[in-house]
Image (spheres, coloured by chain):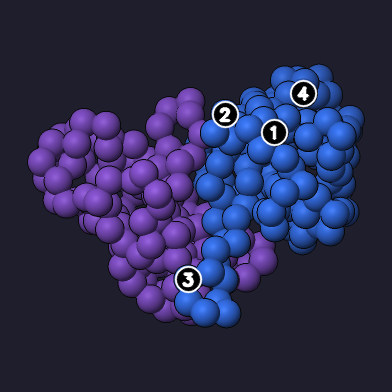
Amino acid sequence: DIQMTQPPSSLSASVGDKVTITCRASQNISDYLNWYQQKPGKAPKLLIFATSHLQSGVPSRFTGSGTGTDFALTITSLQPEDFATYSCQQTYSTPETFGQGTPVDIK
Amino acid sequence: QLQLQESGPGLVKPSETLSLTCQVSGASISSGSFQWGWIRQPPGKELEWIGTMYYSGTTFKNPSLQRRISMFVDTSKNQFSLKMTSMTAADTAKYYCARLRDAMVTPGRYVRFFDFWGQGIQVTVSS
C-alpha cells in the first residue's frame, strides 16, 4: 500500500496567515492527489482534486501544488472557518489511502 | 442537491456482522458513471477506504478487508449497503458513505475523488 504522510502533526496559525500543509507519498503517485477538509463531527469536504483542481464552490484562497511524492495545500489568507483538519488522499493505486490529517488550530 | 445518509446499529458485538445502509436522495443512484463507496475513520486515526461499487454491481474492495465485506446496491430504493463480518474492536470507527466521481482532467485522462459524503455513523464493537 502507498503510505501518505503529513508532517507536521499539527499547525497553529492566526487569521490572515498564509498556511501551507504538506503531504508526502511513499512512492510516485503522479498528480493523483486529493485534499479534504474535516471539521469536528462533520463529514470530510472535498477541496482540491488531482493536486491542483479546485472543487466547485471552494474559495480561491485554497490552492494545491506538487507532483510525484511531495504535495502541498496552501491557504493564502486563513479565515475563521478554515480552522479544521486537512487530509490528503492518493488515488494512484488501490487501496486509495489517506494521510493522517493535519489539524490547523488557532495560535 | 445530492444527500447521503447512513443508517445502521451503533453497537455491534464481537464476531457479529455489521450491516449499514446509505440512503441517497437528490439524484438517482443509477444515473451517470459514479461509484458509491464506504470509508471509515477509527478514533484518532486516518480515514480508511473500504470499497466502492457501480450500481451495476461491479465492486472494488480494500484488499485488507475484502474477505469480510460485501456491498450491494438497491436501485428500487435508491440506496446501497455494506456488510462486514467477524467484527472486532479494531473495527470501531465512524463509517461514512460517499459518492466517487470520475472527472476528465485532460483528454482521455480521468481522476477520482469523493465529492459527496454522508454525515457518518459511529459504530462501536463491544460485548
The three-letter amino acid code for the residue at tag 2 is Gln
Contact check, label 2 and label 4, Cβ < 8 Å: no
**Quarter of the image with the C terminus of chain A in it:** top left
Identify the element where label 1 is drawn: strand
Image vertical order of residue B118 relative to residue B8, above or below:
below
Q: Residue at (38%, 62%) from the top-left corner?
A: A53
Identify the element where label 2 is drawn: loop
Output the letter for the chain in purple: A
Task: Tell which tag, 4 or 1, sits nearer the viewer.
Answer: 1
Give chain B's shade: blue
Q: Earlier in the sequence, mark 4 or mark 1?
A: 4
**Quarter of the image with the N terminus of chain A in it:** bottom right
Q: Earlier in the sequence, mark 3 or mark 4?
A: 4
Residue reaching furthest left?
Answer: A16
Q: Residue at (62%, 70%) from the top-left corner?
A: A93
Chain identity of mark 2: B
Callout 1 environment at 10 Å: few (<14), some (14 to 19), or many (20+)? many
Provide residue A78's location: percent of width, then percent of height: 18, 42
The three-letter amino acid code for the residue at tag 4 is Gly
Provide residue A45's location: percent of width, then percent of height: 45, 41
Question: Which residue is denoted by mark 4 in the rendering?
Answer: B8
Q: Earlier in the sequence, mark 2 or mark 3?
A: 3
How far separated are the C-alphas under marks 2 and 3? 28 Å
Question: Which residue is denoted by mark 1 in the rendering?
Answer: B24
